[in-house]
Image: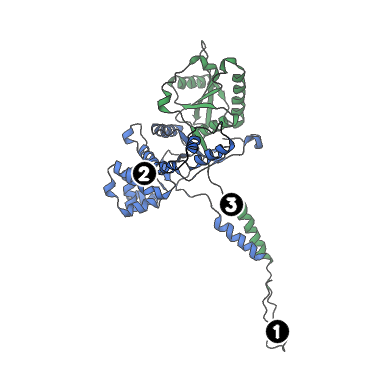
Amino acid sequence: MCDMAFLLLTFFILTAQFKPETPLQVDAPSSSSNEDETQRVLKIIVDTTGRIFLEIKDHTKREEVLRNVAKHFGVAGELGKEEYDEFVGRQTFGAPIKDLVKILKAKATSNEAYKKIGIDPKKMGIPVDTIPKNNQLSWWVLYTREAYFAEDRARKDTMSKERLDIISRPTAEGLTPEQKKIWDEERKKQFKVVIFGDRNARFGMMKQILETLRNRKINRIHLVTNLREAPQAAGGSENKK
Amino acid sequence: MAEIDTSQGGGGKKKGPKKVSTKVDMTPMVDLAFLLITFFMLTTTFSTPKVMQVLMPDKTENKNEKKDESFGKCTVIVLGDYDEAKKENKLYWYQVIKGQPPELAEIEYSSEKMREFFSKKKKDVARDPDCSKQGFVVVIKLKDQARFNAMVDILDEMAIVGVNRYGIQDIEPRELDLIKGFKAQEKK
């Protein structure tokens, strides 16, 4: 029994995941939505002060995306293998592309290190601008989607016609349970853009992000939320600030 | 369980100093182990973050759709603002009804009040024969300084109340004036 207890103990200690670490303090708002986040995701993180950070969840895609974005902004020549490796190893990043190059070169990870190479941490974040040329977020989104797109197309080529027909529907309405299962499955596999915004982030910033995504024809957006108990069960007794 | 056999050989004559019992009391350790197990079992959530889906209208499609003022009474326009002094979100609503100046009213910012409001409006609209075609529509317009959680809370209520047609739009200058006017009146 004692052995058993320690076995269990070790198991739980090893599997315990304390909240995934982010360099940013982001407190998601709550909702009663119970949909899980999936793997193929571009996460747009917005902190309280409105700085935008990005997370490409699948690290195998990171290098390709950076390569294309760097090429677009004409800084590809400054990046070598070491910088790419450094980028792949980073979960989140958020700086104008010129600063990002500097950060990768210096392998800076802390606020002090950023200051040392002349970057004000308060002014970090990926720039969003109403002028399309300066909207760097827009290009990150485009190239990330492209990185997933080729894979999606290859997968779709192998599918049967009926399956393609089912998954191309915008909603699951009017499908048989079996078809609905296929539809749900497909939705989970699809590339998603997820916005992980702090509950106190300004809506103005969100509006700009939503607008940027809409301009890239991404109309299905997901918001990261903490699970709040469904109102039927809790009787809606929760009071929010 | 935890005894260690220290006797050498079988039942020989006693040699050397008097033996002390080598039985170790395992109870506290097992207690601790179980305590830790319980702790980790309770704190482990195996959770992946939850997401909530939002659909935005397609930009290219949207252009063809014209505003139809006659459907104003089926549509509730929700305006959101942020009170910097009180540090809380403020919600207002109005409807566009022909021949009447728009009248703003406040919705108290709490999930119950919002739910109550939307359910009531939904029922009202469902009863109205003029609205049978397009149903209940909610248009959400938030000021730039409104907080992100206001948006999520409203969208959440939409899902709970079952409002299928809703949209997020930019706030118009005349609506900003409406909020200003409402606040001025409130002060008096």
Tell me if mark 1 has few (under 14), some (14-19) or many (20+) residues whose alpha carbon lies within 10 angstroms of its own.
Answer: few
Report if residue A179 is visible in the image.
Answer: yes
Query: In this view, which residue lies farthest toward the top?
Result: B99
Q: Position of residue B139 (x, y in %)?
A: 50, 24
Q: Position of residue B113 (x, y in %)?
A: 61, 28
Q: For the residues labelled 2 and 3, say whether their Cβ atoms are less than 8 Å apart.
A: no
Q: Where does label 3 land, which residue?
A: B44
Query: Mark number for residue B18?
Result: 1
Chain to which the residue tagged by mark 1 belongs: B
Q: Which comes before the other along the chain, label 1 or label 3?
A: 1
Of the chain colours in the picture, the one used for chain B is: green
Quadrant where the image shows the C terminus of chain B: top right
Q: For the residues labelled 1 and 3, say whether their Cβ atoms are less than 8 Å apart.
A: no
Q: Where does label 2 land, which residue?
A: A95
Look at the numbered disc 2 and give the secondary structure of its residue.
loop
Quarter of image, res A205: top left
Query: Residue A74 vs residue B36: left or right?
Result: left
Q: Are marks 2 and 1 on the same chain?
A: no
